[in-house]
Amino acid sequence: MKAKNLSYLFSALTILFWGTAATAFKFTLKHFSFIQLLAWSSLFSTILLFAIIVFGGKLHQIKGLTKTEITPSLYLGLLNPFGYYFVLLRAYELLPAQVAQPLNFIWPLMLVLLSVPILGEKITTKGIIALCVSFIGVILISSGGDLTSFKINSPLGVALALLSSVFWALYWILNLKKPIDPVIRLFFNFLFATVFSFGAGCLFTNFWDINMGGILGSIYVGSFEMGITFVLWLKALSIAENKAKLSNIIYLVPFVSLIFIHFLVGEQIYWTTIAGLIIIVTSILFQQLTDKRQQPKN
């Protein structure tokens, strides 16, 4: 199979797997608390990533790493997956899946916003417009389908879902230009996150109350939300002829997710969710396209 077709196959699988994530979260949270789901899915993801490294013939690269190269995974793993999924899964406990998932997807705009103080990048006027427009989408989604009375059922859940997008954007900024193979970096991030998760879990009551439904759900989340899907996406980008064009395909994920949420979770999708999501994705694409046009040509 040609590299171009293979990149689209990997990206299609990525969209499918990430599209099922919100549904998997809601199903598993019926059996596990958010901290249990975080700990066990992180563990299974770590095991899977290690297997991928072994079968990919990269084990020797781990053996050759220095303490200086491994140390960044301590804070990166604390930020993501531990911190990111800690707040995100708690948001899923408090909110309908159709609200938590789109609010989390505002991270590309958070990436632009955080790049200003951290990377010293300038935000354009059109970037500011995109952020303001996306805020309208956030309001629509948070309304839960009722704009007349506009009452947010769980302000904490909405805040946590938005905070997760900040964690995700911050993680990718701090992860820039790391010299280690991205899959190996991901493995160490999950390894440390697993330690953090089980450590934090011991502070919660009933953390060790384990059931088969929770374990099976955690295996699915650890495999197809966290582990292998990250690898597929990285592989798709590495062999793509047009990385920018392929990257835009990822914005299909929240729409695919709504289909699974409706038919499998049984949520009646609010018109405000669809409208808000369209506004957010449009503002993201608008911001990205305008930034590219303003970049100087060589």
Image (spheres, rainbow, N blue to C red):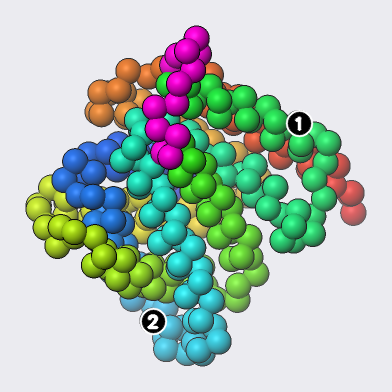
Q: Is residue 198 left or right of residue 1?
A: left
> What residue is shown with label 2?
59
Q: Which amino acid type corresponds to the residue marked 1 in the rendered image? A: Ile
Q: Which amino acid type corresponds to the residue marked 2 in the rendered image? A: Leu
Q: Position of residue 33 (x, y in %)?
A: 23, 50
Q: Position of residue 166 (x, y in %)?
A: 56, 50
Name the foreground residue: 254 vs 117. 117
Q: Which quadrant of the view contains residue 40?
A: bottom left
Q: Is residue 52 left or right of residue 286?
A: left
Is the Cβ of the residue at disc 1 closer than 8 Å to that at disc 2? no
SS class of the residue under badge 1?
A: helix
Q: Position of residue 276 (x, y in %)?
A: 54, 23
Q: Is residue 107 visible?
A: yes
> What residue is shown with label 1?
129
Extent of the magenta region: 145-157
Q: Is residue 67 left or right of residue 41?
A: right
Instruction: Locate the C terminus by quadrant.
Output: bottom right
